[in-house]
Image: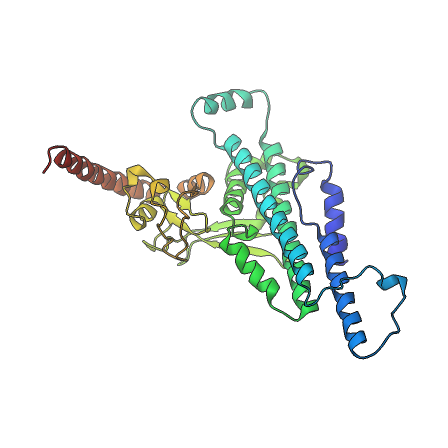
Amino acid sequence: MKFGATYEEYLRLEQDKYLGQCSRVEYKRLKKVLKKCRVGRLLQADGANGDEKHQGSDEYSDVCECNSCTLCDEMFFTELNKEASEIAGCFRSRVQRLLHLHVPSGIQRYIWRFRQCFIDDQQIMVQEGRMLLNYVTMNAIAIRKILKKYDKIHGSVSGRDFKSKMQNEHIELLQSPWLIELGAFHLNCDDSDTDELGAGGFFKNGFFKNFSCDLTGAQPLLTMTISETLKYEYSLTCPICLDTLFNPYALSCGHLFCKACACGAASVYIFQGVKSAPQDAKCPVCRAVGVFGRAVHMTELELLLKRRDKDYWRQRLREERTAMVKQSKEYWDSQAMLSMGI
C-alpha cells in the first residue's frame, strides 16, 4: 500500500479518538499542488516545443501557469510550514499534559495517589502515549515524503533546504525533546506494573519491547523502534561533561545537557536555573542563539535515569549540591561586597 493510502487510513481511524482535534499534514492537498505544478511545467515544455496537443483539454484547464513555480512554492512551503508548526505545538501540549499527570508535584501528587485507589488510569495514559507517538511519526513521515516528492518533480534541493529551515525554527518533529520524554515515559511505565495491564497489547512482550535504555555501553542510548524502517536513537551523554546526563535539560534546539553543564555554558549559577541565561547565550553544540529561554526540564528522562542507576544518581546529586553551595557562597559574598561599595 502506498503511503498516501496508509496515511489517509490512519487519519480515518484516529478521527474520533484522542487526536481528532489535533493539526495534521494535509498530504493529499499538498500532492494536488505538486500535481498542478508538474502539469504546468509539462505544458510550458510542450508550448516551447510547439506541441499543442493538450490545448483545450479539460484535464489541463486548472493548472499552474506561473513561471519557475514561484506561486506554487509560496503556497506549498507556506502551508507546510504552518502545518508543521501547529503539529509541533499540538504534540508538545498533549505530551506536557500527559506527563504532568504521570509525574505530578505538590498537592497534585497526593490527589493522584488518592485517585489511584479508585481508578487505574495507567492503561489509559499508556494508550494515549502510544497514540501521540503514532501521531508524530505519521506526520513526520508525511512531511519527509512530500518534500522528497517536491524535489523529484522540480529537480531541486528546495525540500532539503526547507527541512533545514524547520530544524532552525525548532519545529522538526523527530528532534523534539517531547518525543524523548514520551519514550522515557513508556519505559517508566514498563518499569512499573504494566504486566498487569492485559488489554490493548501493552505487555512487555508487546508494545514495550520497542523501547530500550542502555546505560552500560560506551555510548548510553535511548532507543525507540517504531517499525522495521523507523528507529530513533538518542544519545544520553552530555556533550560538555561527556558523562551520562544528570538532571537533564533540553534546549529548544533539541540538544540535551546536564543542568549544571548548561548553566556553566550560559555563565549563570546552577541555583539561578537554565532559563535565566542571557538571550544571546548560544547552544554549545549547534551555536543557536536564544535557545535557553524555552529549555525543557526532562522529568521523565530524569526519572528513568534515576531508576536505572541509583548509585550514579546519588553521586552526581552530591556533586551538584556541593557545587551549588559553593556558587551560592560566591554569589552572596559578591553581593555583600557590592552593597558595601568595595
Going by the image, does 187 lie left or right of 291?
right
Going by the image, does 138 lie left or right of 253?
right
The residue closer to the viewer here, 188 or 274, is 274
The residue closer to the viewer here, 38 or 19, is 38
Specify the quadrant of the image occupied by residue 87.
top right
* Coordinates of residue 91 in the picture (x, y in percent): 58, 42
The residue closer to the viewer here, 191 or 149, is 149
Going by the image, does 267 lie left or right of 169?
left
Vertical side of 121 occupied by 171: above or below: below
Please say which color scheme the image uses.
rainbow
* Coordinates of residue 150 in the picture (x, y in percent): 67, 63
Count of numbered tags = 0
Q: Is residue 44 visible?
A: yes
Q: Give me the residue at 78% from left, 66% from top.
A: 39
* Coordinates of residue 317 in the picture (x, y in percent): 30, 40
Q: Is residue 206 visible?
A: no
Going by the image, does 78 lie left or right of 301?
right
Q: Give me the residue at 50% from left, 39% from top.
A: 188
* Coordinates of residue 294 in the picture (x, y in percent): 44, 42
**The C terminus, quarter of image:** top left
Q: Give me the residue at 75% from left, 69% from top.
A: 41
Vertical side of 56 occupied by 303: above or below: above
Q: Give me the residue at 50% from left, 23% from top.
A: 113
Specify the quadrant of the image occupied by residue 33.
bottom right
**The N terminus, quarter of image:** bottom right
The residue closer to the viewer here, 248 or 185, is 248
